[in-house]
Amino acid sequence: MAPTLFLLGGTRLKRDFKNQKYSLFWVVFLSLWLKTYIAYKTSFEIDIENWIQEIILFINPVSFLLLALGVNIFLKETRRTAYLLTMSFLITLVLFANLVFFRFFNDFLTIPVLFQTSNMSDLGSSVHELINASDLLYFVDLLILIILLKYKPKLFFNRANNLQDRKFYLLMTIGITFFNLALAEAERPELLTRTFDREILVKNIGTYNYHLYDAILQTKSSAQRALADGSELTEIENYVRANQKAENDDFYGLAKGKNVILVSLESTQSFVINKTVNGEEITPFLNKFIKESYYFDNFYHQTGQGKTSDSEFIIENSLYPLGRGAVFFTHAQNEYKATPEILKENGYYTASLHANNKSFWNRDLMYESLGYQRFYNSDDYKVSEKNSVNWGLNDKSFFRQSIAHLKGMPEPFYAKFITLTNHFPFTLNEEDRTLEEYNSNSKTLNQYFPTVRYTDEALEQFITDLKRDGLYEDSIIVLYGDHYGISENHNSAMSQFLGKEITPFESIQLQRVPLIVHIPGEKGQTISTVSGQIDVRPTLLHLLGIENDDYIEFGKDLFSKEKIDFTVLRDSSFIMKNYLYTMDTCYDKKTGEPTEKESCERYLEKAKQELEYSDKIIYGDLLRFYEH
């Protein structure tokens, strides 16, 4: 029935065109529909597997556009034109914002992300890099309409609508909405109840309906804390206790009493390790350092929309980040039992060092909840145009100035460093460049390698300074990549660099980031256990000789002989020893090819359950009910 009703509307539109006088409503509707579909095909790169998915993609903007523009039929004639033009602009703006956001994050906007306004002042260079001149074409139709309405107003009309017209219109809109949902549900069962992947939602219900759905989720999550009680924590605690693994006694207390130096390597992915560009090593220092450290080469980042802040949250809480927004913004006032607080209770001085604005990612508030005693921010560094690039203080100057802060801390200390230079859009002063750019069709990838090299050199200088000042032998040093630097939007260039096609399987493999744990006096070893950032906290506490059996955490000690090869990403993809699951497909890791879904099924429920349990803890602030 819905397609029939839609054709009737199309018949009316055809009649209008024959009369050479056009309905402003249908002109606006068609232009928005067309530009949305063009964005789907050219900017969002949505993967289509069959003709049914293509049909769903094509029709999914219709129901929202009919609903949003349909308010027009209930307005007075004098207000209709202004309403249609205003809605056209706002809907185009939403589409444009998603387009720009997608170019780097390979994701769609959510309401919590829009609330992160304190980050906006620091995002200038990145946003400028992401906007193309061709993007203005998305607003051209609106400009043309305004000009035509001003100089040829008789070209368009807004016909009066009686009660019967309005009933017909509402029935048509409802019919198309249910037709879209029915197709989507048939193609992707339990779409709105089991999906963590926003691309799948947009592919099936459309960008605009997805934002309505996101608003519903936001309302629901806002109410969860008020309705939560301690009983919800019991089930989660039972799950955590049932999945505990025996730790490796040989490593217990191996670094007891040592200082902890934790370094977050901005946008550093594992594919640069032991690789060359133009015949030169990309990371010569790290390549040497991993030989005298424990190096985990099958270690994945698990961040969501919070990126670096998400990695901090995961590393220090052994909980998953949220699927929407950043915990640092949405739940900074929650009760946590994070690494800084635990170590503070065990005699450590805890500090975070990051030469950026203290309010960026809401760190000044969140760090209090995590238990940090001191936050060394941009106010504690000498930052000038000469020693800065891109996002701020360059890494070499950052580490050099930080040595004085370290020497002023009481020992033992826990100090976390967050680097900046290797951040999108990966710009670097010419005098700081010691590695030539790569040659591909991606400016982003080309510029990425020199900034990675710069951070590598900064780390070498930092380690040298630690040795000079007597801090090296008394410290356990943990280096980890925080999140990806090269998104799927650069797959063509990545394919050229790696010499193979970037399939969904390879895209997940590219989410591996370095984890390097250096313990004084210990020989180097490469460990290939499948792991993720969520495993860092239990590993670190075990090395420091601090019992963690009583904490609620989803990670496992990486040195445990019983640890299973398993880690789950925020989009519900997961990796096992022999298989990898993503986008409803199970892959054989040996071949990289799809295999029977049964091979992955035993961990499907575990992946979903852990993400949901972690979400409940955060949304309900459940740790406030937990007695450690």
Image (tube, rainbow, N blue to C red):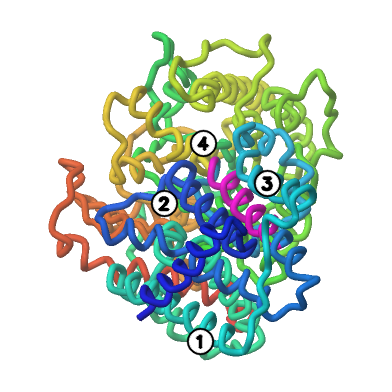
Q: Against 434, is 167 above or below? A: below
- Circle 4 is placed at which residue position? 485
Q: Residue at x 66, y 45 (%)?
A: 139
- Between 583 and 147, the one lying in front of the other is 147
**Residue 101 is a magenta residue:** yes
Cα separation between marks 1 and 2: 26 Å
Q: Earlier in the sequence, mark 2 or mark 4?
A: 4
Secondary structure at numbered mark 3: strand
Q: Which mark is first along the chain, 3 or 2?
A: 3
Image quarter of the N terminus: bottom left
Nearest to viewer (mark 1 / mark 3):
1
Which residue does the image show at 72% across and 59% down from the upper left?
85
Q: Give the residues in magenta.
A: 87-103
Instruction: Classify residue 463 as left or right of residue 441.
Output: right
Residue type indicated by callout 1:
Glu
Tell me which amino acid carries mark 3: Phe
Looking at the rendered structure, the kind of residue marked 4 is: Gly
Mark 4 or 3: the one toward you: 4
Secondary-structure class at tag 4:
loop
Give the left or right position of residue 549, taking residue 296 as reference.
Answer: right
Residue 439 drawn above or below residue 319? above
* Residue on which the image places disc 3: 413
Q: Which residue is mark 2?
A: 532
The 10 Å Cα crowd at callout 3, few under 14, some 14 to 19, many 20 or more, is many
